[in-house]
């Protein structure tokens, strides 16, 4: 595995480092890979330091020095982009947990992604609002996209725009990009949205700017039917910690949230409990994706005809594991690759903040509450 | 003895500018420091003022050893310098420049009173109090420089070429002023190229040459000196 | 877009108020440059540390952010005094490039120390939730107070520099340092006071910013660039000019956000300042030097 244990993506890397061994240890404890005479799985750990050059060299080192069969990584989109070029060159199958939708648009042969990615979270946002419109009879006319202007936000903005245009029902009145690091206060942005009478905002922000914008929405009484994020700021603990009740009714589409626990199948629930017990922290989405990735890799090892990279690759191609069957899979609904090598079985869920908690409102079988749509006006909130 | 300087030595890096200059100045005296270009006159005054590091020798002011004191401490003791080239604060007004001459709290308390005296001395400045010093004519600037020195109520006023760049009429005026200041009991050390003026106002003088005192004596004697003529007139 | 008076008014009022606080950040920066001739990028590091200080004192729960700021200001004054005494005098005689290397290095150190001490997490003071609303314009109390206090302090500092003997002496030593030494001003002491005032003003600006914006260590870099640009824009020496430059930047940012896009506005400010400098190298309010 190559993840960032230091640097900007260290939070994700540490989650991955907690999750991968959980799966590997379980397999080894249960007698190793049976098809290969109970061979134990060995996990080599490398730190890419969230640095692209280090990512290349560390990935290469694992392949050439440690002779690894496959790579689990990189838990950071930039590093995944660079690292996957190395695994491609050496023809080493790699299963990644990064979320940037562009990673699988390069036609790589050995690169697979287990995570719920940004195209899924953005598409779900648009589709969800369209569904709610139908379900409640509240017609949406004017929508806007608001995003920070680095890779994450710009990518999300593009995806939202494409999805809105595909739907073709709403007027996209503005697409507002801002530089998160330079934002001191956000009433300027919100004033702009308000002047255009928008009803739904699709927003991609980091925590700091997300908080500023949400505060400004309250201050200027920008009343929206819905404010929808693709993961981004709202799942971050700081978001609710700072905004308290003002974070309520915000939607965010994501791959995993702790409140899903109640609705998990028993095996997956045990995995989450074990994770919490061993590591003393809650499962985050990166940990969930990492569990999926590791489970897929272990599954492929079990089915590989021999223990070499080519055979492993053949087996990785045909991975098909399911939520409810494999206890390591806590992200619905399993792992199976589509033609782009994205995880076709990974399903984004829609959550809404309710009483300062992320609550699943979609899909139905995982939902804990019904969505509140449109959100109550600021003036009417307690 | 107001000021006693013994064997003063000053270096600019490796270059030695003063090779043991000794001066003695009594209270109420007016003394001139003469010498050709590069003789070390400015260096002497700046070193005395604590604005240059001294590499040897002693300075006694009012009976206290002061050779390692900073300029603001010396100014507080009453040693005030009217520097070569005026060194005004060009983006401050005339009035502000004058006020800044009051470097001690004591002089600041009496600044209104002193200011009136200075403006009497230089009536040309009266109407220009709010003008930026950088926009004054050369002569007016020199008046401000001297006036700023007087605002500090000096016991010892050291002027470095106060007549530099002035028209002859103004040179006369400056020396007339110096005579008045002297008459009020202020001790004066003046570096001057206009030797005739200097000799008229001052009772004694020193002649510097290559960083050494080449000659000293009453102005009457110096006036007859061949050496001085050589220094100034190149004869 | 409906550019109603309320929408435009909202933009202008917020722009002026936030710009005032930018101006307060820039003011201290320009003071140090004027008096000590050092381009002090670390100034913004001071602002961010003041934000953290105010944040920490406030989260103790006893003092509100304004009292906390009032507490932090004298501490920073003392720190500024020590900074000048211990560090800045040592670099004073070095070249301008070295000054930049040094103060930028100090900014890095301050930023990384903040990261080390407080982590990457975003901090945010609880808002009073009070707003002033008039004619469809809503202004958060913290921004109103912040902008007002920043403007008053800029004015106060200007008056102090213009009217008091100490202020005049500080200006004099900035204007002609050698002359100041020669006439017996204690230039080093004056510089210490000036740097102390500058660092105290960083504390004030930081305290005001902390009341309404998010706080994280890397904000120091953004503020450093902002202050530098404002000061360059307004002709590096003038204090009120720096303040005015801050207000202009605030309004431009607001107008650009409303009419174009926030990203463009944020970038555009930088572009605009460089353009302005091409046309008026002496800065917006600067006089052409009389030769
Ligand atoms: N900052 C300096 N660095 C190096 N040498 C210097 C410096 N200042 C003065 N000198 C040298 O020291 C010597 C004495 O200079 P000083 O200015 O004292 O002369 P001066 O008698 O005042 O001459 P002038 O009549 O031209 O003003 C000169 O040779 C000069 O070149
Ligand atoms: Mg000279």
Image (cartoon, coloured by chain):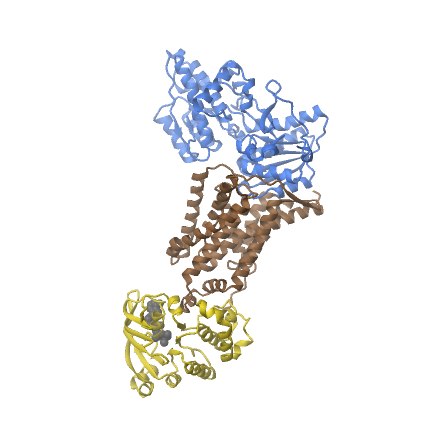
User: Whereabouts is ligand 1, in terms of quadrant?
Assistant: bottom left
The hue in which chain A appears in the rendered picture of the protein: blue
Image quadrant assignment for residue B6 = bottom left
Q: Is residue C196 something that shows in the picture?
A: yes
**Quick check: B151 above or below A64?**
below
User: Where's residue A151, x and y in %?
Assistant: 53, 36
The chain letter of the brown chain reads: C
**Quick check: A73 above or below A186?**
above
Q: Is residue A136 left or right of residue B8?
A: right
Residue at 70%, 23% (x, y): give it: A135
Pick the residue in front: C281 or C62.
C62
**Quick check: A325 above or below C84?**
above
The count of marks equals 0
Pick the residue in front: A177 or C36.
C36
User: Where's residue B16, x and y in %?
Assistant: 28, 69
The hue in which chain B appears in the rendered picture of the protein: yellow
Pick the residue in front: A213 or A55.
A213
User: Where's residue C107, x and y in %?
Assistant: 44, 47
Q: Is residue A113 something that shows in the picture?
A: no
On the rendered image, what quadrant is the N terminus of chain C found in?
A: top right
User: Where's residue C257, x and y in %?
Assistant: 62, 45
Q: Is residue B35 left or right of residue A183?
A: left
Image quadrant assignment for residue A214 = top right
């Amino acid at each position: 595995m190559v993840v960032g244990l230091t640097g900007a993506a260290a939070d994700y890397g540490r989650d991955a480092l907690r999750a991968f061994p959980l799966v590997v240890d379980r397999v080894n404890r249960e007698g190793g890979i049976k098809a290969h005479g109970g061979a134990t799985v060995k996990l080599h750990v490398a730190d890419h330091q969230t640095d692209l050059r280090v990512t290349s060299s560390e990935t290469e080192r694992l392949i050439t020095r440690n002779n690894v069969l496959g790579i689990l990584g990189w838990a950071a989109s930039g590093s995944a982009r660079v690292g996957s070029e190395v695994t491609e060159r050496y023809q080493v199958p790699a299963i990644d947990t990064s979320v940037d939708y562009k990673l699988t648009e390069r036609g790589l042969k050995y690169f697979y992604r287990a995570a719920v990615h940004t195209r899924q979270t953005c598409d779900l946002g648009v589709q969800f609002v369209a569904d709610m419109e139908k379900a409640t009879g509240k017609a949406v006319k004017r929508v806007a996209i608001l995003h920070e202007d680095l890779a994450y936000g710009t990518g999300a903005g593009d995806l939202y725009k494409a999805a809105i245009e595909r739907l073709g029902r709403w007027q996209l009145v503005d697409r507002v990009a801002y530089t998160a690091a330079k934002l001191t206060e956000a009433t300027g942005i919100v004033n702009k949205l308000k002047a255009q009478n928008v009803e739904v905002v699709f927003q991609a922000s980091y925590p700091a700017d997300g908080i500023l914008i949400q505060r400004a929405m309250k201050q200027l009484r920008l009343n929206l039917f819905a404010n929808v994020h693709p993961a981004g700021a709202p799942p971050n603990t700081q978001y609710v910690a700072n905004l308290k009740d003002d974070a309520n009714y915000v939607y965010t589409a994501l791959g995993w949230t702790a409140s899903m626990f109640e609705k998990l199948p028993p095996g997956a629930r045990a995995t989450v409990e074990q994770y919490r017990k061993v590591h003393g922290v809650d499962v985050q989405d990166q940990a969930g994706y990492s569990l999926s990735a590791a489970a897929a890799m272990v599954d492929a090892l079990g089915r590989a005809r021999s223990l070499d990279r080519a055979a492993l690759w053949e087996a990785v191609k045909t991975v098909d594991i399911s939520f409810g069957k494999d206890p390591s899979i806590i992200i619905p609904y399993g792992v199976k690759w589509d033609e782009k090598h994205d995880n076709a079985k990974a399903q984004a869920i829609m959550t809404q903040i309710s009483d300062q908690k992320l609550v699943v409102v979609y899909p139905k079988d995982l939902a804990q509450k019904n969505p509140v749509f449109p959100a109550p006006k600021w003036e009417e909130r307690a | 003895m107001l000021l006693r300087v013994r064997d003063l030595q000053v270096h600019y890096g490796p270059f030695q500018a003063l090779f043991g200059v000794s001066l003695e100045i009594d209270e109420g005296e007016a003394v001139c420091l003469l010498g050709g270009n590069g003789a070390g006159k400015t260096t002497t005054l700046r070193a005395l003022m604590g604005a240059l590091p001294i590499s040897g020798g002693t300075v006694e002011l009012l009976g206290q050893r002061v050779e390692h004191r900073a300029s603001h401490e010396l100014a507080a003791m009453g040693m005030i310098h009217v520097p070569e080239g005026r060194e005004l604060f060009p983006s401050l007004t005339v009035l502000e420049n004058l006020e800044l001459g009051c470097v001690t709290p004591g002089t600041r308390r009496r600044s209104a009173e002193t200011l009136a005296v200075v403006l009497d001395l230089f009536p040309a400045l009266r109407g220009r109090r709010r003008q930026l010093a950088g926009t004054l004519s050369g002569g007016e600037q020199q008046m401000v420089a001297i006036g700023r020195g007087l605002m500090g109520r000096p016991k010892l006023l050291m002027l470095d070429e106060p007549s530099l760049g002035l028209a002859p009429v103004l040179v006369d005026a400056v020396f007339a002023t110096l005579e008045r200041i002297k008459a009020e009991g202020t001790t004066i050390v003046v570096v001057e190229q206009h030797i005739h003026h200097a000799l008229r106002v001052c009772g004694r003088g020193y002649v510097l040459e290559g960083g050494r005192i080449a000659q000293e004596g009453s102005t009457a004697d110096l006036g007859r000196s061949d050496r001085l003529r050589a220094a100034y007139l190149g004869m | 877009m409906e550019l109603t008076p309320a929408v435009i008014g909202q933009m202008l009022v917020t722009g002026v108020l936030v710009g005032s606080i930018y101006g307060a950040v820039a003011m201290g920066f320009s003071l140090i440059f004027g008096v000590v001739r050092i381009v002090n990028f670390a100034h913004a590091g001071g602002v961010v540390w003041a934000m953290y200080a105010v944040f920490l004192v406030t989260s103790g729960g006893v003092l509100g952010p304004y009292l906390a700021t009032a507490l932090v200001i004298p501490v920073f004054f003392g720190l500024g005094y020590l900074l000048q005494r211990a560090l800045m005098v040592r670099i004073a005689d070095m070249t301008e490039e070295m000054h930049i290397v040094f103060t930028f290095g100090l900014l890095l150190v301050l930023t990384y120390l903040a990261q080390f001490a407080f982590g990457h997490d975003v901090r945010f003071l609880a808002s009073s939730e009070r707003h002033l609303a008039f004619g469809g314009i809503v202004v958060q109390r913290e921004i109103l107070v912040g902008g007002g206090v920043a403007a008053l302090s800029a004015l106060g500092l200007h008056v102090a520099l213009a009217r008091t003997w100490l202020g005049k002496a500080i200006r004099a030593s900035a204007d002609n340092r050698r002359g100041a030494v020669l006439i017996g001003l204690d230039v080093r002491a004056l510089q210490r006071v000036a740097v102390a005032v500058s660092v105290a003003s960083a504390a004030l600006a930081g305290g005001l910013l902390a009341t309404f914006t998010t706080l994280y260590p890397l904000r120091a870099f953004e503020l450093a660039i902002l202050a530098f640009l404002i000061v360059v824009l307004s002709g590096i020496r003038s204090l009120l000019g720096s303040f005015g430059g801050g207000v202009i930047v605030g309004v431009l940012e607001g107008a650009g956000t409303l009419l174009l896009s926030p990203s463009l506005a944020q970038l555009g400010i930088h572009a605009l300042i460089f353009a302005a400098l091409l046309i008026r190298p002496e800065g917006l309010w600067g006089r052409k030097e009389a030769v």
